[in-house]
Image: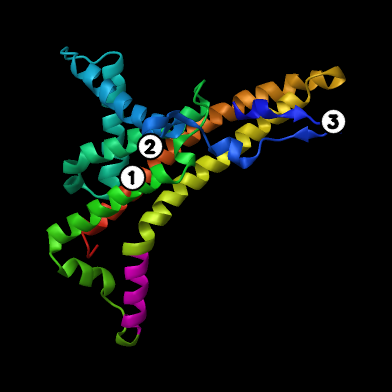
Amino acid sequence: MSLLLAAEESGGGLEFPSLSNLVEWPNIIDSIGLNKIGLIHVLSVVVSALVFFLAAQQKSLVPTGIRTVVESTIEFVEKQIILPAIGPDGLKYLPLFVSFFLFVFFGNVTEVIPFFQMPANARMAGPLVVAIVAWAMFIGIGVKTSGLRYFRDVAFPPGVPGALKPLVAFIEILSTFLLRPFSHAVRLFANMLAGHILLVTFGVLCISVVGGLMTILLAVTVPGLVIFTAFEIFVSLIQAFVFTILAAVYIGGALHPHH
């Protein structure tokens, strides 16, 4: 783990890991350029598919074990994301939103899993790819629903005075079609990177009190680190929820452009 790079310099000062040590990882498989971040993204897909495959093997009417987890996840996405953000029309996109939610969550929660100890979404590439998928989906759904009129409806919302229409059209096109995937990705990336840096910093501070009389402070710092780690698990879930509900809001806007 990166925090183990903390050491006492000859001058007695504490050496914190550099930012590159926190977010840059060597390749695990050089031939395909696969590093730890790429491995986490691959496992996010594999684990999600495996969980649903195992749940589907249960044929009983009463769900148990992993099937309970899967059905609870589906119900959560349906009732807390799709119905509030889109309405019943959005239920046909349930597989898409469940995929968004699980992929982002697994890419976040690896921050607190031994060996990984790094959220894959603390690197911009992963969040940006998923955000571009959401961006392509809501544009495609908008065109499918309203035809090319969709772009006109976005650029010229009703009720705008004639003199302001060019300015509003420029702002709407810029924010909806150009900046939206970037802001969607950066919200997830920045939150996970900030949380990772804080968790590593707190761990380094815990290490720094080992030795001498300062060791008694471990009675405070270690429980604090445990609490902060639990908080990061909660943040991983919240960020998956926020990313998915924003995607639902964007797609809902494409399905109901006048609402």
Q: Which residue is drawn at 16% across and 69% down?
A: 149
Q: In whole angstroms, how far apart are the C-alphas of marks 1 and 2?
A: 9 Å
20 left or right, relative to 76: right
Callouts 1 and 2 close, C-beta under 8 Å: yes
- Asked which secondary structure carries label 1, the reply is helix
Name the residue carrying label 3. Answer: 10
256 left or right, relative to 198: left
For residue 172, what is the image quadrant?
bottom left
Q: Quadrant of the C terminus?
A: bottom left
Is 257 situated above or below 34? Answer: below
Q: Can residue 242 be seen in this view?
A: no
Q: Residue 20 carries which label?
A: none
Q: In whole angstroms, how far apart are the C-alphas of marks 2 and 3?
A: 42 Å
Is 214 situated above or below 128? Answer: above
Q: Which amino acid does label 3 sit on?
A: Ser
Colour scheme of this structure image? rainbow
In the image, residue 98 lies at what x, y percent?
Answer: 28, 35
Which mark is first along the chain, 3 or 1?
A: 3
Q: What stretch is highlighted in magenta?
A: 164-176
Name the residue carrying label 1. Answer: 130
